[in-house]
Image (cartoon, rainbow, N blue to C red):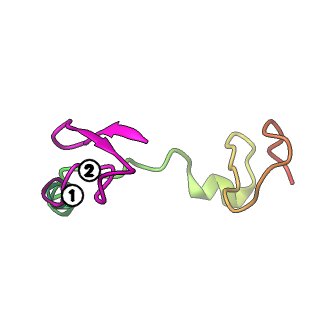
Amino acid sequence: MKHKCPICKAETDSAVHGEFPFCSERCRGRDLGNWASEKYVVSECVFDEEDLAEGKKDTIVLRLDTELDNPNDTEH
């Protein structure tokens, strides 16, 4: 699979680069440093956990631990 390194934008290939999707160990380390220095953060939750606990139906939660026979079917 071909891709661009998320740090330096150099072309990378999963068949060639062991550090894929990064082009090098250096870029992989820079990315890790960005996470460690909190330059990257995970956004806030898109749903309220209290609403889920109360059973409110305005939030959809998809289970990721099971495969769906029908991709449009969200209930199992």
**In the image, is 58 to the left or to the right of 41?**
right
Instruction: Indicate which disc residue 28 carries.
Output: 1
Q: Amino acid at mark 2?
A: Phe
From this view, report whether residue 60 is shown above or below residue 66: above
Please tell me which residue is depicted at 85% across the width and 41% down the height of the picture. Answer: 70
Q: Percent from the top left, x then y, of residue 50? A: 60, 58
Name the residue at 69% across, 50% down: 62
Q: Mark 2 Cα within 10 Å, few/some/many (few <14, many 20+)?
A: many
Q: Nearer the viewer, residue 53 or 67?
A: 67
Q: Position of residue 53 (x, y in %)?
A: 68, 61
Answer left or right for 61 relative to 48: right
Q: Nearer the viewer, residue 1 or 38?
A: 1
Tell me which residue sits at (16%, 53%) in the image. Answer: 27
Q: Give the residue pinned by disc 2.
A: 22
Numbered circles on residues, count: 2
For residue 33, what is the image quadrant?
Answer: bottom left
Whether residue 7 is in magenta: the answer is yes
Element at badge 2? loop
Q: Which picture quadrant has residue 12?
A: top left
The residue under the point 28% across, 58% down is 19
What main secondary structure does the magenta stretch of the protein show? loop
Closer to the chain start, of discs 2 and 1, is: 2
Q: Are marks 2 and 1 in contact (CB under 8 Å)?
A: yes
Crowdedness of circle 1 by 10 Å Cα count: few (<14), some, many (20+)? some
Residue type, label 1: Arg
Q: Quadrant of the N terminus?
A: top left
Image quarter (top left, top right, bottom left or bottom right) of the C terminus: bottom right
Q: Position of residue 49 (x, y in %)?
A: 58, 57
Dividing the picture into quadrants, the one containing residue 72 is: top right
The range drawn in magenta is 1-27
